[in-house]
Amino acid sequence: MIQEVQQEVRLVTGAMVSLLYNEDTSTKINLLNRGVWMMKETVAAPAATAGMLKQKMNSRFRRNGIVYGLISGLTFGLYSTVVALAMMKEPFLGIIGAFAAPIVASAINDALAAIWLLIWNIKKGKIKEIGRSLVTIPGLMVAIAAVFGGPIANGAYLVGIDMAGAAAIPISALCPMFGAIFARMFLKQKIDKRVAVGMFICVIGAALISYVKPEGGVENFTLGIVFALVAALGWGLEGVFATFGMSMLDSNIAITIREGVSGIVYIAVLVPIFGATDLFASALGSVSPMLIIAAAALFTAISFLTWYMANNMVGVAVGMSLNITYVLWGVVFAAIFLGDALTPTVIAGAIIITIGALLVSMNPMDLFKKKEA
């Protein structure tokens, strides 16, 4: 467009030079007006084109952010299924006690996820920032958040899946509801009507899943639901502490600290407390479960990275809402790969909780608004 206007300006200018000396006054005035108009177009065209390019880039930026948010939900759903699949392999199979296998699987998963993230930060040239960030107040907040979100929440999450199957996954998605409650208690953030309605919907979905046990009598189903609730509480508390720390640190660094601290606490504290040291050593020497958990850890790392990329591109509220789709992915993957029964109450409850969590974390109309530059 710009080139065409410039070419026409040159033609008009040349014609003006050749005709101004030969034409009458009316013709001269018309030629001058034409030249002035073309010069204005030459100036205006770049600005208009730049505006169109900016709008196109913003649209693409938002579209990519939505894709990253969906990927974060998809990969966390895969993580939930893959790590549960690992616990069906030796040496986890047949372990006495409800906690040893999930604790060891979580310890290895978070440690390997931290390694994947370290490799990513080395590639990005940010490895030195990790040590510097750890000794800051924001780094300490992220470390505290890691304890709530890792050993407490994620450990309870896997115990819940082990006991209650796919039904534990949507219960864990109550974390935005608990996050809103804790934010009200500790950060004095107001709970508006939309959030309150979303919380109420979440409770209905959780009650629906918990009230009707799957056919066939899943052993310890109710206890598994309780552990899934503990996971939601832990992730809600993680959000409160992480809000401060992760707002002042590079997200790649914060996530690496989160996974690293979580893995260390698992291995140094929880594994010995639950008497799972022998199982941990045995698992490290078993090729098949280690490869499966390594894949789960990679999905964990990708989920966190894409989640924070989405937060940056489309905002935290929309990013969180897209990440919550792990509920639906997790239920579907558990049915396909783990053979868990998809009862009508589990399906309906998962959908209801997803809707409620969406309302808690964002205004649904934001999905249809273009992010301002």
Image (cartoon, rainbow, N blue to C red):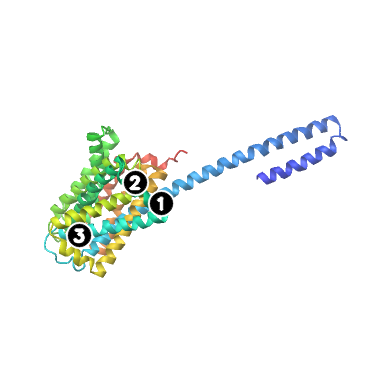
Q: Is residue 125 left or right of residue 25?
A: left
- Front one among 276 and 84: 276
> Which of disc 3 and disc 2 is earlier in sequence?
3
- Front one among 197 and 231: 231
What is the quadrant of residue 334 in the picture? bottom left
For mark 3, does the 10 Å Cα neighbourhood hold few (<14), some (14 to 19), or many (20 or more) residues? Answer: many
Q: Position of residue 330 (x, y in %)?
A: 28, 56
> Which label is found at residue 67?
1
Q: Is residue 359 visible?
A: no
Q: Amino acid at mark 1?
A: Val
Quarter placement of the N terminus: top right
Residues under labels 2 and 3: Cα distance?
A: 30 Å
Q: Is residue 210 left or right of residue 27?
A: left
The residue pinned by badge 3 equals 104
Image point 41% across, 56% down: which residue?
A: 123
Image point 19% across, 63% down: which residue?
A: 280
The residue pinned by badge 2 equals 132
Badge 2 element: helix
